[in-house]
């Protein structure tokens, strides 16, 4: 029998397709609390993948607290079609993803967004895509340290931050699923791409 108060058990549907107007297919994972009660909906768009740590922290973690969570891989990343181009397609893709979300049977017609870093930037991209009257179904945005300016991330306080550049570079290469040859940052680093499709990350 489903629980009526948190923490709930959480269930996940993997690889739900979102077809954009240009035919590109994005992939989303849906995390749901196991309850018969209606629950609020969170939208998270990310180039970092739908696996760990996002699956635990924002996926099942928030579902256990009573939220439906749609964790969407942005264009060209982690199984989603198209080509990932930094800051180029996130505004364009925002409203079609919202249309998909609002059409889901588990969505009650309203949603919020949440996330740090590039997950914060994708929320700003959604705001930029909004028509003049806004998006009335979008009830809240929790924008945490958004990656909205590459210069601010690379040169915080006017000093080059090598660790930030390396972190972003490694995340980018992992998102594309390719490293030069057989090089990996450390043993056990996932290879990404097709090899990562069957892994448990």
Image (cartoon, rainbow, N blue to C red):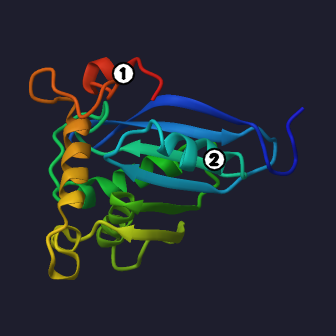
- Cβ–Cβ under 8 Å for marks 1 and 2: no
Res 24 visible = no
Mark linked to residue 197: 1
Give coordinates of residue 76: x percent, y percent.
22, 39
Distance from Cα at disc 1 to Cα at disc 2? 22 Å
Which residue is depicted at the point 48% across and 24% down? 200
Disc 2, SS = helix
Give coordinates of residue 136: x percent, y percent.
51, 72
Question: If the image is split into quadrants, where does the N terminus sit?
Answer: top right
* Res 152 quadrant in image: bottom left
- For this view, does 69 lie left or right of residue 75? right
Res 166 visible = yes
- For this view, does 8 lie left or right of residue 26? right
User: Which residue position holds label 2?
Assistant: 61
**Is residue 26 positioned above or below 188 on the image?**
below
Give neighbour class at mark 1: few <14, some 14-19, many 20+ (Cα, 10 Å): few
Q: Residue furthest bottom?
A: 157
């Amino acid at each position: 029998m489903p629980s009526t108060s948190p923490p709930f058990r959480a269930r996940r549907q993997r690889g739900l397709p979102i077809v954009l107007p240009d035919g590109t297919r994005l992939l989303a994972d849906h995390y749901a609390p196991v309850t018969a009660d209606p629950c609020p909906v969170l939208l998270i768009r990310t180039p970092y993948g739908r696996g760990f740590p996002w699956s635990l922290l924002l996926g099942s973690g928030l579902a256990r607290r009573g939220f439906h969570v749609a964790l969407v891989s942005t264009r060209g990343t982690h199984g989603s079609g198209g080509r990932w181009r930094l800051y180029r397609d996130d505004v364009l893709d925002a409203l079609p993803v919202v249309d998909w979300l609002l059409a889901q049977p588990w969505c009650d017609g309203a949603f919020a967004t949440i996330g740090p870093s590039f997950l914060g930037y994708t929320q700003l991209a959604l705001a930029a895509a909004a028509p003049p009257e806004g998006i009335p179904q979008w009830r809240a945005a929790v924008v945490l340290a958004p990656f909205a300016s590459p210069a601010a991330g690379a040169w915080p306080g006017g000093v080059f931050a090598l660790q930030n550049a390396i972190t972003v570079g490694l995340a980018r290469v992992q998102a594309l699923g390719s490293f030069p040859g057989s090089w990996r940052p450390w043993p056990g680093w996932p290879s990404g791409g097709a090899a990562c499709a069957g892994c448990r990350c």
